[in-house]
Image (tube, rainbow, N blue to C red):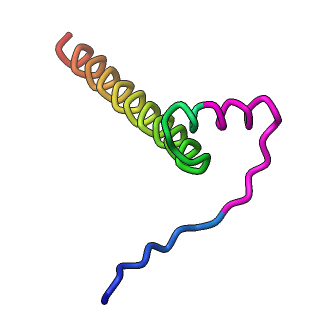
Amino acid sequence: MNKKKHHWAKMLVRLPPPLKAWVVEEAERNCASHNSEVIRCVRERMEREKAAASLAKAKLRGVAASAAAE
């Protein structure tokens, strides 16, 4: 049997107690592991930042196009 191995980087993260409690609650609510909740949060943040960067670039292109048209 040829199993594909994932090469995941391990990382130790120290969380303040209120943040740890939130992760535990969210994981339980979503029937997920603590690890997967942290990954979900980081991925959501990455997507928001990518979207914000794309929007900023689009606005800059719009401003440049408006200036060129004048």
The verdict on residue 46 being magenta is no
Q: Main secondary structure of the magenta part?
A: helix
Q: Position of residue 50 (x, y in %)?
A: 40, 36
Horizontally, residue 47 falls left or right of residue 23, namely left
- 39 or 31, which lies in front? 31
Q: Quadrant of the N terminus?
A: bottom left
Left or right of residue 36: residue 10: right
For the magenta stretch, what is the residue range? 11-25
Quadrant of residue 10 in the image?
bottom right
For this rendering, which residue is in front, 9 or 34? 34
Q: Residue at x 29, y 26 (%)?
A: 58
Residue 24: image location, x then y, percent:
66, 37
Q: Nearer the viewer, residue 53 or 68?
A: 53
Q: Is residue 41 left or right of residue 56?
A: right
Residue drawn at point x = 79 percent, y = 48 percent: 14
Q: Residue furthest bottom?
A: 1
Q: Position of residue 40 (x, y in %)?
A: 49, 41
Q: How many marks?
A: 0
- Position of the C terminus, as image quadrant, is top left
| Residue 39: % across, % down | 53, 47
